[in-house]
């Protein structure tokens, strides 16, 4: 599958639940002129708590570097979990690998898009980092509960992909309100600065929608949903949900 550009975020390499094998499969079966890593590629927060690094995580890094070496333009937009890289930006690694905090992208149709991880628009992360870290612990707990539940489903041969963390995100009032506010704030910022759209990550919820005059695109994540935003060669934006074949 060939695309003009691929946008992925929230891989969280260095954590137990990063779906690195699935991501590697996705990268092997797709081609693009540009690959955008929209933040939280490496989870520095989790690594500080406990160092976990699997061979599959190294394989993903090696694949991305190989893509850059072969001519794919790779752009790494930093996120809050890999904020340890931010003091060194902008950073150019070779001819085809650039590290920045945010950037502009011009689509096939000539429209301008702001690419940002999105944590700069999360008031909790910006003003109460301790609370954001506590929330990260809570999310990790939900993922562990999911893991146990899926083991139980498998034991009883129950075909279900139900996720407690996804349920909380989609149904708990405060969580839904936070996501709505986040989307509106990002879109308002993009419109104010003359962009036609915004491409982001951060909240682990893949989305493609129109908010006022702004095209809002969220890449989702590679922890649970395994999603990517792609721009086709004809200029259409799509969300891809990648699963085991």
Image (tube, rainbow, N blue to C red):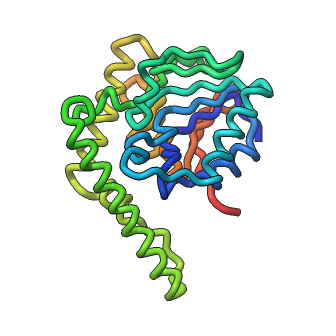
Which residue is rendered at x = 43% and y = 22% of the image? Answer: 86
In the depicted structure, whether residue 63 falls above or below residue 91: below
Hey, which quadrant is residue 185 in on the image? top left
Name of the residue lying farthest toward the bottom: 156
Name of the residue lying farthest toward the top: 194
Which residue is rendered at x = 64% and y = 19% of the image? Answer: 93
In the depicted structure, whether residue 132 falls above or below residue 138: above
Q: Position of residue 211 (x, y in %)?
A: 37, 31
Q: Position of residue 120 (x, y in %)?
A: 33, 26
Hey, which quadrant is residue 163 in on the image? bottom left
- In the depicted view, which residue is nearer to us: 162 or 237? 162
Quadrant, the C terminus: bottom right
* Residue 145 seen: yes
* Residue 224 seen: no
In the rendered structure, the answer to whether residue 206 lies left or right of residue 108 reads left
- In the depicted view, which residue is nearer to us: 61 or 149? 61
Q: Position of residue 231 (x, y in %)?
A: 63, 32
Q: Position of residue 31 (x, y in %)?
A: 75, 36
Quadrant, the N terminus: top right
In the rendered structure, the answer to whether residue 178 lies left or right of residue 46 reads left
- In the depicted view, which residue is nearer to us: 58 or 189? 58
Give the tally of numbered discs: 0
Which residue is rendered at x = 38% and y = 58% of the image? Answer: 166
Which residue is rendered at x = 63% and y = 58% of the image? Answer: 243
């Amino acid at each position: 599958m060939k695309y003009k550009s691929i946008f992925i975020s929230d891989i969280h390499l260095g954590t137990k639940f990063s779906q690195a094998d699935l991501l590697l499969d996705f990268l092997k079966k797709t081609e693009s002129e540009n690959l955008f890593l929209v933040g939280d590629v490496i989870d520095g927060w989790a690594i500080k708590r406990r160092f976990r690094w699997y061979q599959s995580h190294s394989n993903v890094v090696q694949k991305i570097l190989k893509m850059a070496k072969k001519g794919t333009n790779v752009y790494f937009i930093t996120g809050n979990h890999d904020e340890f890289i931010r003091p060194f930006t902008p950073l150019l690694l070779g001819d085809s690998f650039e590290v920045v905090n945010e950037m502009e992208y011009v689509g096939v149709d000539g429209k301008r898009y702001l690419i940002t991880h999105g944590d700069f628009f999360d008031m909790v992360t910006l003003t109460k980092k301790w609370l954001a870290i506590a929330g990260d612990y809570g999310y990790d707990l939900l993922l562990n509960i999911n893991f146990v539940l899926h083991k139980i489903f498998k034991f009883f041969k129950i075909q279900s992909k139900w996720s407690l963390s996804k349920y909380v995100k989609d149904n708990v009032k405060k969580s839904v309100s936070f996501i709505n506010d986040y989307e509106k704030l990002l879109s308002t910022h993009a419109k104010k600065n003359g962009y036609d759209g915004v491409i982001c990550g951060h909240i682990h919820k893949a989305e493609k929608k129109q908010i006022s005059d702004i095209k809002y695109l969220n890449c989702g994540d590679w922890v649970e949903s395994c999603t990517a935003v792609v721009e086709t060669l004809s200029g259409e934006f799509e969300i891809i949900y990648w699963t085991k074949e």
